[in-house]
Image (cartoon, rainbow, N blue to C red):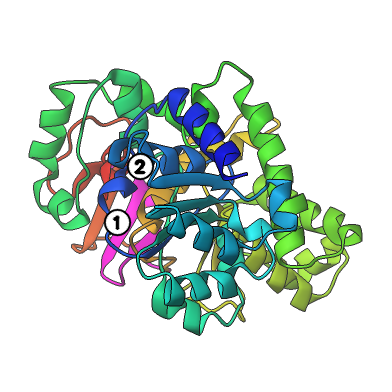
Amino acid sequence: MMQAFFKTHKYLLEHLNVPVRRGLMDIVDWDDRLIGIVGTRGVGKTMFLLDYISLKFGTDKSCLYVNLNNLYFSNRSIASFADEFQKTGGTTLVLDQIFKYPGWEDELIWCYDNLSTLKIIFSGSPLMLADKNLTEFEKRAKVYHLEGFSFREFLNFKSGSNFDRISLERLLNNHVSIAAEIVDKVKPLAYFTDYLHHGYYLFFQEQSNYLENLLKNINLILEIDISYLQQIELKYLPKLRKLLYIIACSAPFQPNVSKLSNEVETSRATIINYLKYLNQASLIHLLYEGEPDNLKKPGEIYLQNPNLVFSVATGDVSNDVLNKTFFCNQLAYRHKVSCSRRCDFLINDSYQFNIGSKDNKSLNRSGKNSELWWASEMEEIGKGRDIPLWLFGFLD
């Protein structure tokens, strides 16, 4: 059976077509012996793993990719398979979709403790790590989150560029020169609207209906990932779907949990749990004033990325909603994003941001606030505390 997996491994590498190098590739410490790559459906976890294999190993048989959807693993343990692989010369085992395998965490702990010359890289849903006591597992594993495509990655692919990631501090201090250097090579605003509509998920490169694929993706997350991993009975699935629809039609908004529970016809406690699951599944962002707390009502709810806004839109989509959703999405990956009464967003408990145009006084809820930054739409190069919105898509 091992040879059959090698045959599949070879076929996948031969037909691999990577649109752009993902930023996470340079962040992962590949020297660790137990590495997890988690991310929601559609962000390209499988391609990311195969890209790493191709770059690091080529066709060397010391590395093997295995998808745990294979029925073979209904009657074969991960531990015994990994043991056989190591004994036959294997050094790196890549296990895709590991959350489909019951007891995966205990078996990976065993492999780490008993197979000292074997590195294991695994992928799965972020939900598989939620609400579990994984203390022993977390002592051994280093887990990274793969997000969807940033605007920088999308722009690199579409324009054939190779722009690097930028830290938030460098962006704030040098945004004028950074933007000028980028604009000198490519017109980012020519690609920005497309990104908001269809640039976040990997299947933007496919010749098919993007929004139809996205809708299928959403339903798979609800029907399989959330329902399976959180053990929600399928009869309650319509309530979860209805809650997401209400959010999608209203976001961003300040939730009234009592009103939501009446509309969805379920308890307040269930609504709080469902919001948590949707957040863990990367379908929404829950923003809080101060420290996040899953037990209390969030201050604001956003959809997780702008593409999701179009997936349920029945009419014109507000630029204000898209811009704020974009900013929240691009910052939340590596930074703490909070809601605030003084501005649109508070970043890392330090930086106050409004989104839109500084000339639109109705957007300035803070009066003459000298600490306020602006992320401005339809602006190529900013000045002072006024930064082009698109440039936040270059953050690391």
**Does residue 335 belong to the magenta stretch?**
no
Query: CB of mark 1 within 8 Å of CB of mark 2?
Result: yes
63 or 212, which lies in front?
A: 63
365 or 16, which lies in front?
A: 16
**Label 1 neighbour load within 10 Å: few <14, some 14-19, many 20+:** some
Q: Amino acid at mark 2?
A: Tyr
Q: Position of residue 178 (x, y in %)?
A: 12, 38
**Label 2 neighbour load within 10 Å: few <14, some 14-19, many 20+:** some
Name of the residue lying farthest toward the top: 207
What stretch of residues is rendered in magenta? Answer: 341-363
In this rendering, would 216 be left or right of 364?
right
Q: Position of residue 395 (x, y in %)?
A: 27, 48
In this rendering, would 363 be left or right of 316?
left
Instruction: Indicate whether 310 appears above or below 90.
Output: above
Name of the residue lying farthest toward the right: 235
**What whole-number distance in Å separates the C-alpha atoms at marks 1 and 2?**
10 Å
Q: Residue at x 18, y 62 (%)?
A: 370
**Does residue 349 belong to the magenta stretch?**
yes
Q: Which residue is mark 1?
A: 30
Q: Residue at x 74, y 52 (%)?
A: 224
Q: Earlier in the sequence, mark 1 or mark 2?
A: 1
Q: Quadrant of residue 212?
A: top right
Q: Is residue 125 shown to the viewer in this render?
A: yes
Instruction: Indicate whether 356 appears above or below 234.
Output: above
Q: Amino acid at mark 1?
A: Trp
Q: Which residue is mark 2?
A: 52
Q: Residue at x 27, y 54 (%)?
A: 27
Q: Which mark is residue 258?
A: none
| Numbered disc 2: secondary structure | helix
289 or 115, which lies in front?
A: 115
| Numbered disc 1: secondary structure | loop
